[in-house]
Image (spheres, rainbow, N blue to C red):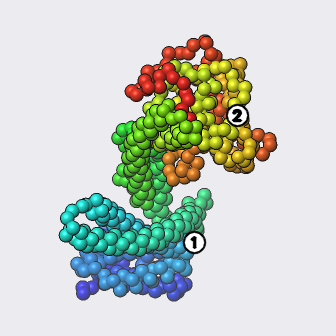
Amino acid sequence: MQEPRRGRPLSPLRNDLGPEMTAWANRLREFYTSLGMTLGELERLVGIDATTLSRYLNGRRLPEIAFLGKLDDAVFSRTQTRMHKDVRESVRELYLAACLVHEPQRHEVYMLRDALARAVQRAELAEETVWELQAELHAEQRRRELVENSLRQLEARTGPADDVDTLRRERARALAERDMLTALMEQHSAELVSAMREQYAIAQAREQLATELHGAERVLDEHLESRWGSPDGPDPGRSQEPRPPKAGRWRRRRAGTRRRQRTDLETLRARAEHAARELPRVVGRFSAGDVLDADLSSLLPLPASTYSDDDIARVAAAMDLVLHDAVRLAGEQALLRGNVNAMFTNLSRRSQGLLQRQISLISELEEQEADAAHLASLFKLDHLATRMMRNGENLLVLAGEEPGRRWTSPVPLVDVLRAAASEVEQYERIELTSVPAVEVAGRVVTDLVHLLAELLENATSFSSPQTKVRVTGHALPDGRVLIGIDDAGIGLSAEDLADINERLAAPPTVDAAVSHRMGLFVVGRLSLRHGVRVQLRGNGHGGTEALVMLPVDAVHAEGEGAPAPAPAPDGAGDDAGGGAGGGG
């Protein structure tokens, strides 16, 4: 190697530098000597003035850690060869050892940066693992759905006897594949839960490291400010040492980064708050079957490329995924509800048609029957068919449909109450008292009969067979009518009453839980349809009282006339102008 050319010889190292700084300075001098450059040439190569380089070489100042990379670049420019990995590691260790003793604040910042970089790598690896497991689960779920469809098709297939063995073998293969996929999904689900927990733990550790790093950088800034920017000027003992040229730029750069991060976080928070407000409305419109293309685009946060911070960009991407999944699931659930509702409607319409024919046939038999015992049995059958008709209408209510029975003329309230009582199994226990002389609008009659029948059914079912269920009515001065249904049953706790009244005021979405209190769910749906208020409360003697408040537009005094009724749907003519009573 050629002899080094120096602008001036290096002065000997001071004896008070300490072993760590001495080792670092000597190693740096070895590199400088091997490069064969003057300080001026090295200055132009690394972008650091010769005076500062001289102080580095003399151990009077430690460079920033980025200087190690510039030193590697200088070696490459001179020799066209990069430092060996072991050499780079040894130089870094000597530098950090000197930094730990002479610049402990800076050393802590560097250590935290390294730890944070490793945490980011672990987080990226964990995120990749989670994505891969989610993709595998999704693929397995799709495969299992295909297998389930194949099984359903096999169950529906019929053919010659010689095809039975083939069908049996195909079904066995499909069942085995389904079981295998189910086991895989369970395994990958457990792995996904574990990976997500690890991802969460890594994220917490990374957040803690970032907090510690910000604190360490703040301490370092304060140290540099006190060292180089005090009102009295720099330390007299270092009067010949200029202020590091990068200290101010570093602080300005960090301040700019924090401002951008703050802006990113404010944008992300605003979009998240917007999504939190809009998502329930969008899901509700999905349930109603509306078109939601415009709403979907407004829900999604800004694209990840608009965020300056990578971590915030990843959070935004995760939010995009969550919102997409939420809206997709809402759409799938709405489609499923629509299919189930259509099934309920078709089954109910068919059942009602058959029941109506059965009731007509029973009525004909009643007219022809002279035997009292047989006639009593026919009355019971008629009554049972009427109750079955109401249960069929429950399916229509669950599906959001309206029953086919309609009245175009008003019906006296007493007839409505009698019709409701006739649809209850223990109708003989129901006692009507003090019913006002008012009429119910024809458009309300069918649903009101159904609503009252459900309440009367509950009252008779949850009270002693030896007691009466009393029904009263009161016409209020403002034109409304209050109906009370009072039983002497087992009563309800305050918590149960509050829960039931809440469900009556706002019926929940149809799900499996509805089947346990279907009657009250139907009451809530029917009451909302006509603005009827229903509330349960204790009656003071152990039982329960149901209060039904009919609005002004649903009732009027007999003889006063009513507003023109809405046109009846097809098939309503059979009941138009008739009483509200059912069979029995």
Check whether the beta carbons of the residues at disc 2 and disc 1 lie within 8 A of each other.
no
- Label 1 sits on residue: 237
- Label 2 sits on residue: 431
Q: Which mark is first along the chain, 1 or 2?
A: 1
Q: Is residue 368 visible?
A: yes
The structure residue drawn at horizontal position 27% and vertical position 85%, both measured from the top left corner, is 3
- In three-dimensional space, the C-alpha distance between marks 2 and 1, rounded to whole angstroms, equals 106 Å
Relative placement, left or right, of 517 versus 432 is: left
Relative placement, left or right, of 465 versus 116 is: right
Relative placement, left or right, of 43 versus 106 is: left
Q: Is residue 331 visible?
A: no
Quadrant in the picture for residue 434? top right
Quadrant in the picture for residue 520? top right
Q: What amino acid is at disc 2?
A: Glu
Q: Position of residue 336 (x, y in %)?
A: 39, 49
Q: Position of residue 190 (x, y in %)?
A: 45, 72
Q: Is residue 280 above or below residue 211?
A: above
The structure residue drawn at horizontal position 70% and vertical position 46%, both measured from the top left corner, is 465
Q: What amino acid is at disc 1?
A: Gly
Mark 2 or 1: in front is 2
